[in-house]
Image (cartoon, rainbow, N blue to C red):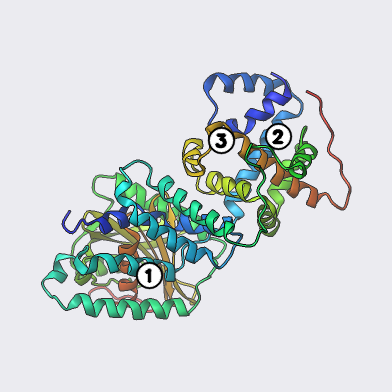
Amino acid sequence: MNCVDARTLIDAYADGELGVERSLELEKHLETCPSCPAELESRRALGSALREKLDYHTAPLALHRAIRDELGRDEGAVLRTPASQRQRPHAWLRMAASVVLVAGLSSALTYYYAGPGGADATSDEIFASHVRAMQSDNRLIDVVSTDEHTVKPWLDARLDFGVPVKDVTAYGFALVGGRIDYIGGRTVAALVYHYQKHVITLFIWPSDGRVRPIRTSVRRGENIAEWSDGSMTYWAISDVASGVFLEFSERFQAAEPVPETGAPPTKKP
Amino acid sequence: MPGDSKRARFEREMLPHLDAAYNLARWILRGSEDAQDVTQEAILRAFKYFDGFHGGNAKAWLLSIVRNGCYSWIKSRPKTESMSEDDEGRLNPEHERALEAAGHGMPSPEARAIEKADRKLLQEGLLELPTDYREILILREIEELSYKEISEIAKIPIGTVMSRLSRARALLQQKLVSRRTDQDGTTRAGVAR
C-alpha cells in the first residue's frame, strides 16, 4: 500500500469503519510510513477538538413548547394523561395553563445560557451515574421509599445541605427513593422518580448562588435538564419522552419542598 | 401502554432527538435564526408521515427529514450557499486546490495545532466549509453516527460518505493549521508515497 491509497482509508480507519482486512493492510503501511501516522494523529485531534469545543445548540424551550402545542392540536387531551389526573378532570386544564406560565417565564429569562466550563464533565458524570444505576438490580437506591418525609431526613443526615425533596405525584411522577452520589468531586443527593416505566434521576447539590433557567440537552437518548434556583443546582436525566421530561423539570422547579420533619437538623440554605 | 397514541409514540421515539435535529439545522443553516422554524416544520412533517416509519433507526429517520427541510430552505433563498460537489460528485476546482495544498504529509505539529485551535477558530473554520461538508462533520463527529446511518440521512452511498468525510476533514484541518501558521510562514513538506 502506498500513501495515496492509505490516505483514502485513514478516515474510515480512524472512525472504526474499515474492514479487518483493509485495517491490517493500513496498519502495516503505518508502521513504516514516515508521514501517514501523523495524518491519522491529526484526524483524531480534529475529531476530539470538534467534540470538545463546538457549540451544541440544544433546542430552545420555545421550540419544545411549539412542537408540543402543535402535536396536541391533532389529538387533544387524550394523550398520556396519568391516572392521577384522570380522576380530576379539570386538573389537566389548570395544569396546562400554569405550564405555559412557568415556561413563558423561564424562557423570558435567558435562553442561551452557555454552560460553565465544567458543564460537559458534569453531564458525563450524571449520565454515567444514571446509566450505572439503571443497570444494577436495585437501581442503586439506598433509601427505598415513596414518602418524601422518609427520604428527606435520610439524605439530610448524610449530606452537608438540606435536600429539597418535592412531591410531584399529582403530575404522574412518583418518588421511589434516593441515594448519595458523587458528582464533580462532591457528595450530592440523587432522587429517583418514576414516570410509568421510566426512571428519572434528579441530582441536587448547593449552587454557586446564580439562578439559571432550565436548559436541556440530549446524550445518547437520555434527556438531561439542568437548572438552578440560586441555592441549589439540579440536574435531571431520563429516557422519558422530552415533553414529559420537560414537564417534570418545570413541575419540580415550581413545587414547594416538603417541610422539615424536625428529625435531623439540617442547614437550611 | 394506556394512552399510547400516535402522538405518544412519536414523542417517545422522536422527540429525544429534538436537540440533535435542532443542532443539525443550526449548523447546516449557519446559525440562522430560521433554524427553529425549519426544525419545527420538519418535526411536524415527520409526525404527519410517522405512520410510514416502521421501526428502525429513529434518529436517522428524523434527521433526514430535518436535513431535507434545511436544504429546501436554502434553495428557497437567494443563492449564497456553496456546495462542494456538483451533481456528478466532482469537487469545485477551488476546493480541489485547497485539498491538494492540505494534501500529503501532515507533520505531527499539525495535530498539536489542531488540538490547540480555539473554539472560535474551529467554529469559523466549520462555518466556512461548504454545506455538505459541514453537515457530514456534525453527523459524524458530534452525533457519532455510523457511515451507514449517514448514508441513509444524506442519501449517498457509503463510499461517498467515506470520501466526503475525508475531504471535509482535510479541508477543515488545513484551515486550522494555515491560520495558526500564518505568521511564521511555515510550509508543509510534500511527502512522496
Query: What is the spatial separation of the Cα atoms under label 2 and label 3, in whole angstroms?
Result: 14 Å
Three-letter residue code for mark 2: Glu
Dot 1: within a 10 Å radius of its alpha carbon, few (fewer than 14), some, or many (20 or more) residues?
some
Q: Is residue A50 left or right of residue A172?
A: right
Dot 3: within a 10 Å radius of its alpha carbon, few (fewer than 14), some, or many (20 or more) residues?
some
Q: Which mark is residue B56?
A: none
Q: Nearer the viewer, residue B123 or A189?
A: B123
Q: Are marks 1 and 3 in contact (CB under 8 Å)?
A: no
Which residue corresponds to mark 3? Answer: A15
Three-letter residue code for mark 1: Arg
Q: Quadrant of residue A198?
A: bottom left
Label 1 secondary element: helix
Which residue corresponds to mark 2? Answer: A39
Which residue corresponds to mark 1? Answer: A65
Q: Residue A10's spot in the image, x, y percent?
A: 64, 30
Three-letter residue code for mark 3: Asp
Same subunit, labels 2 and 3: the answer reads yes
Label 3 secondary element: loop
Q: Is residue B37 left or right of residue B103?
A: left
Q: Chain of mark 2?
A: A
Q: Chain of mark 3?
A: A
Q: Residue at x 28, y 71 (%)?
A: A165
Report if residue A268 is visible in the image. Answer: no
